[in-house]
Each structure stands twice: as C-alpha cells, then as structure tokens.
C-alpha cells in the first residue's frame, strides 16, 4: 500500500470513529461575537462556567474566544462559515438580528441552527431623578409639546427599537441620540444632554440604586421578578413589548442528534442555582424555547426589527 493510500485509510478511519463515538469527542470553541465584559460575553461565560462546573461536556475542553467587530458581524460570520461543524457554538444578541438587516453581511439568522432561547433581556426607559417626569404619561405630555432627546447604545440596536416602539405607540416624535457604549450613554443622561435613555437594567441599576435615575417603564410583557416595582409599558397603556433574545445557536447543517444533545444539556444548565443567580443579578427574564420553537421566535423578532428599522429609515 502506498504512503498516500495509507494516509487516506487512516483519515477515513478517524472520521468513522469520530462519527460512531458518543458526542462530544473533541474540544468545543465557544465564540463570543463581542468584546469582554458586555452582556453577551457575560451570558456566554456563565453558560460555559456551569458546563465546566457540572462536567456537562464530559472530559473535553471548552474554550471561549472573543471575536468582536462590526456589531457582531465578524464573530457571527466566523460561525456561519463553518456549516456542519458540531464543535463551534455562539450566543445570540440584538445585533445577531439587526446587523444583517442594516449591513451587507454574508449571513442572516437562518444560516444557523437554533438550539435554545435561555433568557430575555428587556429594556428600561429611564430619566434623572431630579427631572419633572415621575410617570411615563408626564413624559409623553411633554414630548407632545417640545422636542425630546432619548439616548441609547447603537444607532440600530434594541435600544433604538424600543424607543421607536414607544414613540409609535404614544404618538410622539423625538430625537434619538446613539452612543457607542453604555458609559457614554449614562454620562449623556447625568449631564442632562438627554431627557431619557433606553437601556437594559444591568447598565443603569447602579445609578438607580444610588438615587440618581428613575425608571419609568419596562419593555417585557410582564414585570421583572428582580425589579417588580417597575411597571411595564403595556400596563401603562403603551404597546411596547420587546426584549433581546439571549440564546444559543450553532452552524447550519449540524446533525439532529447533536442539536438534541445540546438541548438536553442546556436544560440542565438553566436548572442550576448558578443560572438562576445569573438571571436575578442581571435582571433577566428566564424565558426558554428549544430548537425549532426558538427558530420561529427568531423569525418573528427579525420581522419586527425590520418593520421598525424600516420605519426609521435605517434600512437602505
């Protein structure tokens, strides 16, 4: 047998052995499409820490890598290009849907295998404590008389969508001011450059606890279990229901049994006290959907993003 033939025989034998072995038989790369320290990074590392702690990935190694850039385009693109690879995985975010809508990416959400929705990250509408707005109705009344500035992180992300849904429901107009990061957004409100901001709870609760900010509304369909004193938009008469899907996806074309393996494993993750503590400390709602149900949810959310961003002229 020639050397080349021997190499081919050994290669195919390894592939067959890998296919016949119980998943997983190789290390996993968990790609975070954003930089360290943000909401997506924290969620991803919490999942990985639980997987490691409870040895849910057997004796194989799980490596976390950050691939930031292009509002998620680089990291998500890296995963999308690895169709059929059952050893790479990533977490969803608002940008998982908005970036392909407003940019020319080589991928969309349909280029991934939906595994699980693990949580929903809804938004707060926040004002300064010393502002004249004690209720959302007072804010709306002022907005109908004069131009209001509402800030958020990013020009087309979830903050923009929630602000737009609020304006649409309330019948008001406003000037939206995008910021590059959360710290700049907070400074915009503390310096009175903004009348209000839209943000996820984790970014503003320090200022709320310090007595500097007041929360007027929450964008989920029900009150937060962590901040039950904050009313929803809906219960105050404004049709605003929106949250960032914190979920898990893999490349397209992975075997069905691998997807089922991950669904079973992630059901164990969300049942742990560590996960429940993560939800409580970050102010997230523990909504779960599995497999195709999560895929259907992504499709509905994508349609809503497109409708809102198109009405703002953000889609060209």
Image (cartoon, helix red, strand yellow):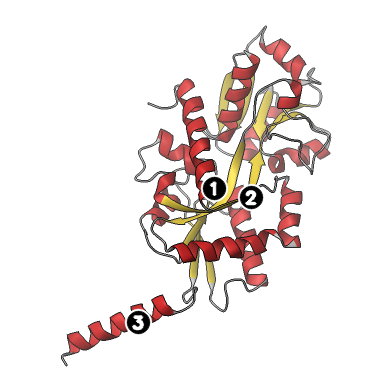
- Give the camera-side residue of 182 and 270: 270
Residue plotted at (61% across, 25% down)? 163
Comparing marks 3 and 2, which lies closer to the viewer? Answer: 2
Q: Residue furthest top?
A: 145
**Crowding near the residue tagged with mark 2, few <14, some 14–19, many ≥20 C-alpha atoms within 10 Å:** some
Q: What's the CA distance linking mark 1 and mark 3?
A: 34 Å
| 269 versus 174 height, above or below | below
Q: Is residue 155 visible?
A: no
Image position, residue 278 (x, y; %): 72, 54
In the picture of the structure, the residue carrying the numbered disc 2 is: 288
Q: Is residue 296 visible?
A: yes
- First in sequence: mark 3 or mark 2? 3
Image position, residue 20 (x, y; %): 41, 78
Q: Residue furthest bottom?
A: 1
- What quarter of the picture does the N terminus occupy? bottom left
In the picture of the structure, the residue carrying the numbered disc 3 is: 14
Res. 294 mark: 1
Left or right, 197 with respect to 7, comes to right
Task: Name the secondary structure under disc 2.
Answer: loop
Task: Name the secondary structure under disc 3.
Answer: helix
Left or right, 135 with respect to 102, comes to right
Q: What's the CA distance linking mark 1 and mark 2?
A: 8 Å
Q: Quadrant of residue 7?
A: bottom left
Image position, residue 140 (x, y; %): 70, 15
């Amino acid at each position: 047998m020639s050397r080349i033939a021997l190499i081919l025989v050994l290669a195919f034998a390894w592939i067959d052995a890998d296919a016949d072995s119980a998943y997983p038989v190789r290390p996993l790369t968990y790609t975070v499409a954003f930089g360290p320290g943000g909401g997506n990074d924290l969620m991803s590392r919490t999942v990985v820490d639980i997987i490691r702690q409870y040895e849910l990935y057997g004796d194989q190694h799980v490596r976390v890598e950050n691939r930031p850039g292009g509002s998620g385009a680089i990291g998500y693109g890296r995963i999308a290009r690895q169709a059929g690879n059952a050893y790479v995985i990533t977490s969803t975010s608002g940008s998982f849907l908005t970036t392909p809508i407003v940019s020319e990416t080589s991928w969309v959400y349909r280029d991934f295998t939906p595994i699980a929705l693990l949580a929903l990250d809804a938004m707060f509408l926040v004002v300064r404590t010393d502002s004249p707005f004690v209720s959302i109705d007072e804010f709306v009344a002022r907005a109908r008389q004069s131009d209001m500035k509402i800030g958020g992180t990013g020009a087309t992300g979830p903050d923009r969508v929630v602000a737009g849904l609020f304006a649409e429901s309330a019948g008001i107009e406003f000037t939206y001011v995008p910021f590059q990061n959360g710290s700049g957004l907070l400074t915009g409100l503390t310096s009175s450059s903004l009348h209000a901001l839209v943000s996820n709870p984790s970014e503003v609760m320090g200022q709320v606890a310090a007595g500097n900010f007041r929360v007027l509304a929450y964008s989920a369909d029900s009150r937060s279990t962590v901040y039950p004193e904050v009313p929803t938009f809906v219960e105050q008469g404004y049709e605003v229901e929106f949250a960032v899907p914190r979920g898990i996806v893999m490349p397209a074309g992975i075997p069905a049994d691998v997807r089922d393996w991950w669904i079973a494993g992630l059901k164990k993750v969300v049942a742990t006290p560590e996960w429940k503590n993560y939800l409580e400390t970050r102010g997230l709602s523990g909504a779960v959907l599995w497999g195709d149900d999560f895929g259907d949810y992504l499709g509905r959310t994508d349609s809503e993003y497109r409708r809102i961003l198109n009405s703002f002229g953000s889609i060209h």
